Each structure stands twice: as C-alpha cells, then as structure tokens.
Amino acid sequence: MAVTHADLTPSRRKTDLGSKFGTTLMVVCVLCGLSSFVFCLTAESMKSEVTWVQMALGQGRKVVCLYSGSGRTPFVCSLVSLLLLAIAMGLEHGYLLTAITKTSDSNPGRPPLLVWMSYSSTAKSMKWQALLFFMGTWICFAVGEVILVIGIAVESGHLHGWARARTDCLVMRTGLFAAAGVFGLTAMFIVCALYLTALQAQKLYEIEESVRREILEASNVYASQPQESVAVTVPQDSRSYEADWSMQTCQDHRKPSNST
C-alpha cells in the first residue's frame, strides 16, 4: 500500500486550533446563538401584557391591573435562551483557553501560543484585534444575560394567580427580549471571529518558529565546519632577493667608517 503525504503528516489533537473538533464546536456555538435568538423572539411575542381597569370599591373607585397571561411561555423561553448562551460561551472560551495554553503534539518543544512574543506589525495588530474581540464578546454576552435574567424575574412573578387583580404589575418593555437575542447572537459571531484570529495567529507563529529553527540549524552547521588554514606561497625569486638584500645590509654595517 502506497504511503501518501497525508499519512506522514502528524494529526491534530482535539484541543488544537484548526482541528475538526474546534470547527464543529464553532458550528455548535453559532447554532446555540441562533436557537437562543429564536427563543428570545418567542418570548418577545408571548410576553405578558397589562391592562389597567377601574374597580368600584364601595363609594370610591380604584385602579388595578390585570395580566394577559401567566407568563409561563416567555419564562421558559428566556430561561432556555439564557442556558444556551451560557453553555456556548463556556464551551467556546474553555476550548480557546486550552488551545492557546498547550503545545501541539507535532511540536512538543515549542512554547504555547499564549507566551508568543513577536515584534512584527502583523502580530501586534492580531493581538489588539483578539483583545477587542474578547472584550466585545463578553460585553455582548453580559448585556444579553442581564436582560434575560430581568425577564425571567418579571415573568416568574405572576406564574400563579395571574388573573387576580393587582395594584402593581411589572412587565417587560417592548423589544427587550429581542434585544437580548441580538446581543447573544452577536456574542456568538464575535466568538467565531476570535477563533479565526487565534487561528491566523497560530499560523503566523508556526511560520516564525520554522524560520527561526532553520536559522539556528544553519548557524549550527556553519559553526561545526572546520576552519581551513590558508597557506601563503612565496615565490623562489622573491625569497632569494630577500636573502641577498639582508646579506648586503649586514656587510654595509660591518664596514669601518673613513676617518678624516
């Protein structure tokens, strides 16, 4: 059986960036965001409404409010939406944290992506981009979750005895559940953008590590080569000329000086 290049290429772990598990997890997170958005729209369309009426009490009148429904459907929808967003954010950020803090099996000696230090402009822009995506996804997630928690608290206040007249009724304003769904879906898309940024950073990191490794190997090979000695060959004529010149100089020094 023939051995192909794909067989020799080391397989990625599930926790590595760019693996099938990571891609599948991204798709699941986006689906969770879409499902949460649908549940929020359902809660928005089924949320409780309040009707104010006047009731005669003896000789006077009193203004009371009545709920249009028990609020069970928006309560369940908002609760499911909150759980879906929380699960998706926990899985995604847990995966990203694991992926950037661990090394790959194909390069066990390489430091993790989290401690990558590069002074190139591309790497710096990627770091700022990842920071903005990280902050943006948590802001959108926090705003959406707060709105959903408020909706759950409001709708759970009249699950029982909702047809009874009350002097004070709390309801969600129009569009808040839909806004929570938009914030949650935006958080999921920003998480995907953060994943793609981390994947690009890993590719750039691998290229820099490969270039650095090649430079080190080339320098080690050059340092291990023996230095060849350079032999200087002096022509025979020049050596004889130097010998005659030195003997003539010695004879000139030995001659006595003429006295006047």
Image (cartoon, grey):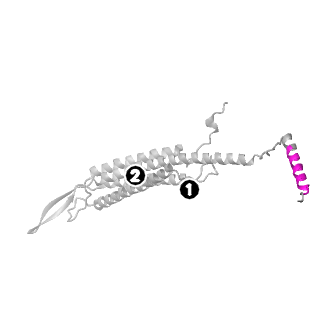
Provide the residue designation for mark 2. Answer: 187
Residue visible at 66% across and 33% down?
Answer: 3
Name the residue nearer the viewer: 29 or 84. Answer: 29
Q: Amino acid at mark 1?
A: Val
The reply to whether the C-beta atoms of the residues labelled 1 and 2 are less than 8 Å apart is no
Residue 164: x and y in percent read 22, 61
Residue 154: percent from the left, percent from the top?
Answer: 29, 60
Percent of width and height locating residue 126: 48, 50
Label 1 or label 2, whichever lies nearer to me, is 1
Q: Which mark is residue 132?
A: none
Q: Is residue 139 rendered to the left or right of residue 104?
A: left
Which residues are drawn in magenta? 241-256
Q: Secondary structure at mark 1?
A: helix
* Residue drawn at x 40%, y 51% as measured from the top left: 187
Q: From mark 1 to mark 2, how far is it between C-alphas?
A: 26 Å
Image quadrant for the N terminus? Answer: top right
Left or right, 221 with reference to 148: right
Label 2, secondary structure: give it. Answer: helix
| Corner quadrant of residue 240 | top right
Q: Amino acid at mark 2?
A: Ala
Tell me if residue 20 comes above or below residue 260 in the rendering. Answer: above
Q: Is residue 177 magenta?
A: no
Question: What secondary structure is the stretch in magenta mostly built from?
Answer: helix
**Nearer-the-camera pick, 164 or 18:** 18
Residue located 71% across and 46% down the image: 222
**What residue would you read off at disc 1?**
115
Tell me: residue 168, above or below residue 3: below
- Tell me residue 232's x, y (percent): 81, 44
Residue lying at the far top of the rendered structure: 1
Q: Tell me if I can see residue 73 in this picture.
A: no
- Within-10-Å neighbours for mark 2: few <14, some 14–19, many 20+: many
